[in-house]
Image (cartoon, rainbow, N blue to C red):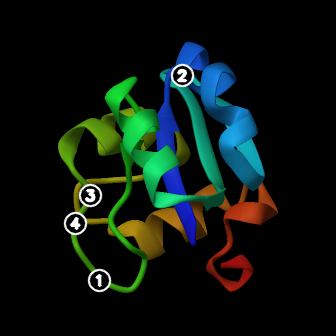
Amino acid sequence: MKTISIASDTAWKKHQLNFKSAHALEIPAGHIIVGDIDADAITAFEKDGATTLPYILTGEKLPPGIVAALSHLGVTESDNTMTASLKISKVHSAFHPSQF
């Protein structure tokens, strides 16, 4: 399943081989990653500090830490994963929701 996560540079480098396919964008907080990763690998990734954004179709608002990490891309507290993905896709097309 494709997920979007935010991780430190250290966590990304440690877990990048667990992704079947992935695209990463360097951000001030580390990296934002979109990719296919198994559920067990997500658990280990999150134990090392990665944060997974809510599933794109839920419409859930983004947690404050994610908003802060992506604010330089125009993401605000009113965004959800879908609207944030559209903003991020202006910088990296792999984050466009049509790619999921």
* Looking at the image, residue 42 lies above or below residue 88: above
Q: Residues within 10 Å of mark 3 (few under 14, many from 20)?
A: some
Q: Which mark is residue 62?
A: 3
Q: Amino acid at mark 1?
A: Thr
Callouts 4 and 3 close, C-beta under 8 Å:
yes
Callout 3: helix, strand or loop? loop
N-term mark: 2 or 3 = 2
Residue 11, which numbered label?
A: 2
Residue at 60% x, 17% y is 9
Eye-nearest disc, 1 or 2: 2
Report the label total. Answer: 4
Q: Secondary structure at mark 2?
A: helix
Residue contact between numbered discs 2 and 4, judged by CB atoms under 8 Å? no
Location of residue 48 in the rendering, given as x and y in whole percent from the top left corner: 40, 23
- Relative horizontal placement of residue 100, taking residue 7 as reference (left or right): right
Q: Which residue is at the front of the view, 33 or 48?
A: 48
| Label disc, if present, on residue 29 of the rendered structure | none
Contact? badges 4 and 1 (CB < 8 Å): no
The three-letter code of the residue at mark 3 reads: Leu
Task: Assign the C terminus to one quadrant of the image.
Answer: bottom right
Compute the Cα span from label 3 to label 1: 11 Å
Give the left or right position of residue 28, taking residue 53 as reference.
right
> Between residues 47 and 65, which one lies in front from this camera angle?
47
User: Sequence order check: which comes first, mark 2 or mark 4?
Assistant: 2
Mark 1 to mark 2: distance in Å?
26 Å
For marks 1 and 2 on the same chain, the one whose residue lies earlier in the sequence:
2
Residue nearest the viewer, comparing 77 with 1:
1
| Snapshot quadrant of residue 39 | bottom left
Three-letter amino acid code of the residue under disc 4:
Lys
Eyeballing the image, is 60 above or below 19? below
Task: State the residue lying farthest toward the front.
Answer: 40
Q: Which residue is mark 4?
A: 61
